[in-house]
Amino acid sequence: MEERLQKIISQAGIASRRHAEKLITDGRVSVNGRIVTELGTKVEPYKNKIAVDGKVIAVEKYVYILLNKPKGVVTTLNDPQKRKTVADLIRDIPERIYPVGRLDYNTEGLLLLTNDGELTNALIHPSRKVRKVYLAIVEGFPTEEKLDRLRVGIRLDDGMTAPALVNIVDFDRERNLTALEIVIHEGKNRQIRRMCEKIGHPVKQLKRIKFAFLDLQGVRRGSYRFLTPAEVAELKSL
């Protein structure tokens, strides 16, 4: 996938984006031996030899992974308490990749990991309003009136939530449980759990089943797959 030359130089740690632009306009950057001075130039970083002042830069390969995180795994690369982390599930990936957002210890489901910091920042920024769909198993049988409180937004300790889409999927009268599909676009800490506790129906199980247009089809619990170039491009267009 082609990227702007100044972005490639910046992400290689050579210079800031603005300084990289000056390096280009000053004629200090070459692609396959040819000096490039136009800022809009795009190249594929892994198929071309990019040099600054004659020195070829090392371009890190971007990796994009969709992981089906199990319950009981920490969404960090290392844990002081020595609990199992998502890094333990991707040990065969040589690149150092990081979670896009987080799922708490007892939540399972879809988690993206990548070393593309720019995409990560874009996906977690509130202005993007990326949809995240959860399946929540809650205690009891919430009424429509209670669910409407979630649908219009509910006040938590750290402020009001944005309106959520909430639908009843199923219920189990014998076990006194209800399955809810909840769609949000925010990323407050333990948001779904706190929302449900607020209306008096604590979460017993929680699973993220979709992130934007991505789902868990074909990915077993504890396993992962690489995103396709088309999926990466679509994420970047959100």
Image: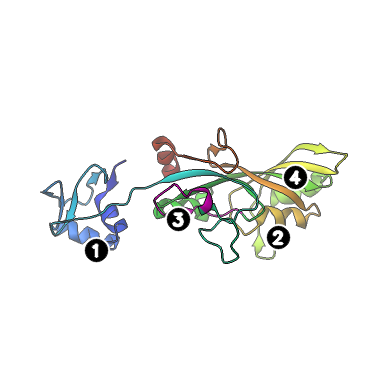
Q: Is residue 111 magenta?
A: no
For label 2, the residue is 155
Compare marks 3 and 4 and give the one earlier in the sequence: 3
Q: Earlier in the sequence, mark 2 or mark 3?
A: 3
Is label 3 or label 4 in front? 4
Mark 2: amino acid? Arg
The residue range painted magenta reads: 88-103
The image position of residue 187, as x and y in percent, is 58, 55
> Please, is residue 119 above or below residue 81 in the view?
above
Q: Are marks 4 and 2 in contact (CB under 8 Å)?
A: no
Report, in whole angstroms, how far the alpha carbon at label 3 lies from the one at label 4.
30 Å
Kindly identify the amino acid type of the residue bearing the numbered disc 1.
His
Numbered label attached to residue 121: 3
At label 4, the amino acid type is Ile
Q: Nearer the viewer, mark 2 or mark 3?
A: 3
Label 1: which residue? 19
The residue positioned 52% from the left and 61% from the top of the image is 78
**Residue 186: percent from the left, percent from the top?**
59, 53
Under tag 3, what secondary structure? helix
Q: Is residue 100 magenta?
A: yes
Calculate the distance from the C-alpha at mark 2 to the C-alpha at mark 3: 26 Å
218 displayed left or right of 117 = right
Image quarter of the N terminus: top left
Q: Residues within 10 Å of mark 2 (few under 14, many from 20)?
A: some
User: Quick check: 110 left or right of 142?
Assistant: left
- Residue plotted at (29% across, 57% down): 12
Q: Which mark is residue 137?
A: 4
Q: CA distance from mark 2 to mark 1?
A: 44 Å
Using the rendered view, name the quadrant where residue 27 is placed. Answer: bottom left
Q: Earlier in the sequence, mark 2 or mark 1?
A: 1
